[in-house]
Amino acid sequence: MLQRPLTAVLDRERGARRAGLRWAKTFAVDIALALYPRFTALDIVGPFQVLSLLPGARTEFVAEKTGPVFDNTGALQLVATRSFAEVTRPDVIVVPGGMADGEATKTDPLVQWIARVHPTTTWTSSVCTGATYLGLAGLLEGLPATTHWLTYRRLAALGAHPTEQRVVFAGKIITAAGVSSGIDMALHLAAALAGEEVAQAIQLAIEYDPQPPFDTGAASKASPELIRLAAKLLTS
């Protein structure tokens, strides 16, 4: 019984008209999802899963060079189909976190690309420590922003005002907290692009109904012992 109305909501043309949604047949948005060596997989795969369901969205993985890019575990790779040099005016960019941000500088190819394309984006977004790259590009000076809790100090050093809030809007910049929050960010972004009804339909389509077994998903909820263990898991 659920499949037919879901199809009506998510179909790009006939279903859109049947559902009476407000996007036009010509609605299109170019979404560039950035990759770099040692990215964190869920940071970018979560938003990709959400945003790829947007009617009319063109989602693509981009990197300094085309080809496979390995994540921080070295066990998973995603393929960049276009290079930073080829993608000059995306409507939306999504920058994931990973294990390389601590070594990144303003000369990093990803940082330079962000600085080049940001003036013409509709939305510039990051997940987890991806906010570091936005900060290095000079985009977060004086703005509220969020990132993984282990990176608050670095974000502050780059001029931002860190907050534990899961998703933060500052003008056309959206930052999300650690890893799993990229799904929340992408749903907010979907609503901003295509309306809440579409975003709600996408949430239902991916059955995103979080019911975590433990209430320790933020540093403010965890004991000092758990914080030390989590930090060890991430840095070992």
Image (cartoon, rainbow, N blue to C red):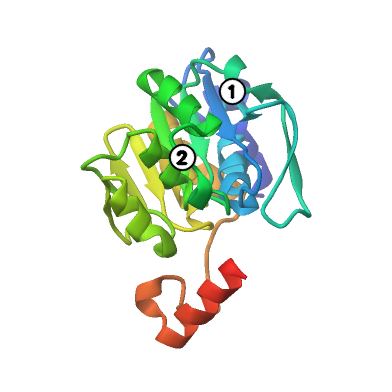
Q: Using the image as rendered, state which of residue 104 and residue 77 is in the foreground.
A: 104
Left or right side of 25 for 223: left
Q: Amino acid at mark 2?
A: Thr
Q: Secondary structure at mark 1?
A: helix
In this orientation, does residue 196 appear? no
Left or right side of 118 for 101: right
**In this figure, which residue is indicated by the disc labeled 2?**
105
Distance of label 2 from label 1 (alpha carbons): 17 Å
Question: How far across and down, in percent of the image, does residue 87 sit?
Answer: 57, 18
Q: Amino acid at mark 1?
A: Phe
Residue 169's place in the image compared with 57, above or below, is below
First in sequence, mark 2 or 1: give its number.
1
Left or right side of 92 for 49: right
Task: Rate crowding at label 2 as few (under 14), some (14 to 19) or many (20 or more) other CA atoms within 10 Å.
Answer: some
Question: How far across and down, in percent of the image, does residue 204 sit?
Answer: 56, 50
**Residue 84, which numbered label?**
1
Q: Secondary structure at mark 2?
A: loop
Left or right side of 90 for 67: right
In this orientation, does residue 226 appear? yes
Q: Using the image as rendered, state which of residue 157 and residue 117 is in the foreground.
A: 157
Which residue extends farthest left? 142
Residue plotted at (36% across, 20% down):
119
Question: How far across and down, in percent of the image, does residue 163 sit?
Answer: 29, 58
Image quadrant containing the C terminus: bottom right
